[in-house]
Image: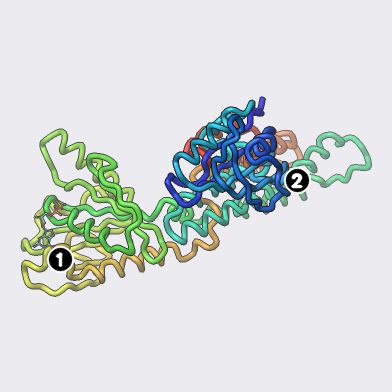
């Protein structure tokens, strides 16, 4: 049973600010607006108005008011929007006035968007795109999120689902009318052909190297190596490149620090893992284990060693990093009076793709390092224009669709019509879950959990 109350919230950022945007959505939005400003403005036209306290008649503020009657509004309901002066007392005064109107209450987190979804204004993938657009930190993330909000994957999934349902109808016709003379014998052939085409198209979209997911989350570069090699110093120096830093937040866990960088428009998440070293101490062992785990899951490891300390000790070799690319960063070259340099090549220790000599302390060689990282990110994300999938949820749904189609295609056409129809129905359902067209009650809370109030 949908909630028919009228909700209101501050949709703009934290006050005090020049302007505050308050949105009101629901069946009483028009009543509320009339009570506050004394009239309903022309739909979708900004109107200058005075907001009065409905009880005392006192003027609270002079505002711009907008009126979007249903269904042509953000939520699909009647929506009113007020642009107030963004002071605490102004906003509080308007909220108090709104709360006194019968049927009006403050919105919960994500409630506007949830109503937009329930009223068919946005499909689920667009809801996710909206969340991503608000969270986007780099231009490349913003572009991808915007395309998703505008149906990049949602429209495609819906088109696939429609084609699948058409193919399914052929199979069902074959089943229902198999005894009747005027049904063409070969309905199954075209249906399976269509299923094959769909299967190949979706498999093609899945074969993207997970670049969309990476773009959304940032390419993960782990800084690892023995203790005191200068990892934290390097991280700080990379983060201090003022143009590069987006949102550093320290100490996400005891062992790993994350910094988000914008390298030429591409998102890179730097991880500083705790000093990796064999240790007998249980707490430290746990830290080392987690650090290795994070480093192994990274796209690239910068393995930092003290380049002034002579040879590399045996316990300083990178271990258990799987197939992750590794660059050897020889740090502290200021101590040995060496010039910064970099080069490709192997060392005797392991298959380094790349060796760099730097001083994190003096900054020597840092430009070459950031340029190399930018190049790496640029190459990695070079083909993201064609990427469609941005979340594990999408990938799972499409993988399940392909699996169901594969099962349908593996059947012996003439004898297994019922089973073929069943698998095709399953494939259509997973596509429907992707956009939220079929019952998705179980995943809604997960998707809306990350939304904030007023959105
Ligand atoms: P971590 O344990 O690998 O994170 O190492 P830190 O970043 O904490 O550095 C350990 C020590 O090495 C600190 O005293 C740093 O000031 C010093 N250090 C780091 N980088 C350099 C460098 O390039 N040259 C010199 N001379 N000292 C450095």
Q: Residues within 10 Å of mark 2 (few under 14, many from 20)?
A: many
Q: Position of residue 53 (x, y in %)?
A: 58, 35
Left or right: residue 25 versus residue 18 is right
| Observer able to see residue 144 | yes
Q: Position of residue 85 (x, y in %)?
A: 50, 48
Q: Is mark 1 within 8 Å of ligand 1?
A: yes
Q: For mark 1, what is the residue?
A: 359
Which numbered tag is attached to residue 44?
none
Q: Residues within 10 Å of mark 1 (few under 14, many from 20)?
A: many
Whether 311 is drawn above or below 37: the answer is: below
Q: Distance from label 2 to label 1 (Cα)?
A: 63 Å
The image quarter containing residue 124 is: top right
Whether 432 is drawn above or below 227: the answer is: above
Left or right: residue 358 versus residue 406 is left
Q: For mark 2, what is the residue?
A: 167
User: What SS does tag 2 mark?
Assistant: helix
């Amino acid at each position: 049973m949908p909630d028919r109350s009228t909700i209101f919230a501050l949709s703009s950022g934290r006050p005090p600010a020049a302007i505050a945007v308050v949105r009101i959505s629901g069946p009483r939005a028009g009543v509320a607006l009339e009570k506050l400003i004394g009239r309903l403005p022309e739909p979708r036209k900004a109107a200058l108005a005075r907001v009065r306290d409905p009880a005392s008649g006192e003027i609270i503020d002079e505002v711009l008011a907008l009126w979007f009657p249903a269904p042509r509004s953000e939520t699909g309901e009647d929506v009113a929007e007020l642009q107030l002066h963004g002071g605490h007392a102004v906003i509080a005064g308007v909220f108090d006035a709104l709360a006194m109107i019968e049927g009006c209450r403050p919105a919960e987190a994500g409630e506007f968007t949830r109503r937009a979804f329930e009223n068919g204004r946005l499909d689920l993938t667009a809801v996710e795109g909206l969340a991503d657009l608000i969270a986007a930190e780099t231009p490349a993330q913003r572009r991808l999120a915007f395309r998703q909000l505008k149906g990049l994957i949602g429209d495609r999934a819906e088109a696939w689902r429609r084609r699948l349902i058409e193919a399914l109808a052929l199979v069902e016709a074959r089943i229902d009318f198999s005894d009747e003379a005027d049904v063409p014998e070969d309905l199954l052939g075209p249906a399976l052909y269509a299923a094959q085409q769909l299967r190949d198209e979706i498999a093609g979209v899945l074969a993207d190297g997970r670049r969309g997911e990476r773009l959304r989350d940032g390419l993960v570069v782990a800084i690892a190596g023995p203790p005191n090699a200068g990892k934290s110093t390097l991280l700080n120096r990379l983060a201090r490149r003022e143009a590069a830093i987006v949102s550093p937040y320290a100490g996400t866990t005891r062992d790993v620090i994350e910094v988000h960088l914008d390298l030429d428009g591409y998102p890179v998440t730097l991880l500083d893992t705790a000093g990796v070293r064999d240790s007998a101490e249980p707490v430290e062992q746990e830290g080392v284990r987690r650090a290795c785990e994070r480093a192994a899951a990274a796209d690239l490891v910068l393995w930092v060693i003290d380049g002034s300390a002579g040879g590399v000790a045996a316990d300083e070799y990178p271990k258990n990093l799987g197939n992750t690319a590794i660059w050897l960063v020889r740090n502290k070259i200021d101590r040995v009076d060496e010039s910064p340099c970099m080069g490709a090549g192997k060392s005797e220790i392991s298959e380094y793709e790349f060796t760099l000599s730097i001083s994190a302390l003096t900054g020597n060689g840092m430009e070459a390092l950031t340029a190399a990282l930018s190049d790496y990110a640029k190459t990695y994300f070079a083909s993201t224009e064609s990427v469609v999938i941005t979340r594990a949820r999408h990938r799972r749904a499409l993988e399940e669709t392909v699996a169901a189609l594969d099962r349908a295609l593996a059947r012996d056409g003439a004898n297994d019509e019922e089973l073929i129809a069943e698998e095709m129905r399953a494939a259509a359902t997973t596509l429907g879950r992707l956009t939220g067209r079929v019952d998705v009650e179980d995943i809604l809370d997960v998707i809306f959990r990350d939304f904030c109030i007023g959105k």
